Amino acid sequence: MTTVKKMYAVWIKIDETLPWIELKGKYRTKREAKKAARDTIDRVEIRVVEMPEKKRIVKTLAATH
């Protein structure tokens, strides 16, 4: 008879606009999985960049009646 062992995966949700991200690796315990998630979050690199302002060219419509 074989014994089935539970393994845990780690999923991270950063923002409502982004999908869940599954991290590589499977962990034997929840504690190991939480530690892996914390280690990953601690190593996250964040880059803030300047975005040029988009100028919209709006054409006026002349309505004739």
Image (cartoon, grey):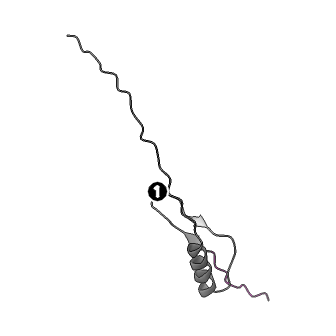
Disc 1 marks which amino acid?
Answer: Thr
Is residue 52 left or right of 42 when viewed as pictured?
A: left
Q: Which image quarter: residue 39? A: bottom right
**Count of number-bearing discs:** 1
Which of the two residues, 60 or 48, is positioned nearer the viewer here? 48
Taking the magenta stretch, the answer to whether it contains residue 36 is no
Q: Secondary structure at mark 1?
A: loop
| Residue 19 x %, y % | 53, 59
Magenta span main SS: loop
* Within-10-Å neighbours for mark 1: few <14, some 14–19, many 20+: few
Magenta span of residues: 1-9
The residue at 55%/69% (across/down) is 12
Quadrant of the image containing the C terminus: top left
Q: Which residue is mark 1?
A: 17
Which of the two residues, 39 or 50, is positioned nearer the viewer here? 50
Is residue 41 left or right of 51 when viewed as pictured?
A: right
Q: Residue furthest left?
A: 65
Q: Is residue 28 above or below residue 24?
A: below
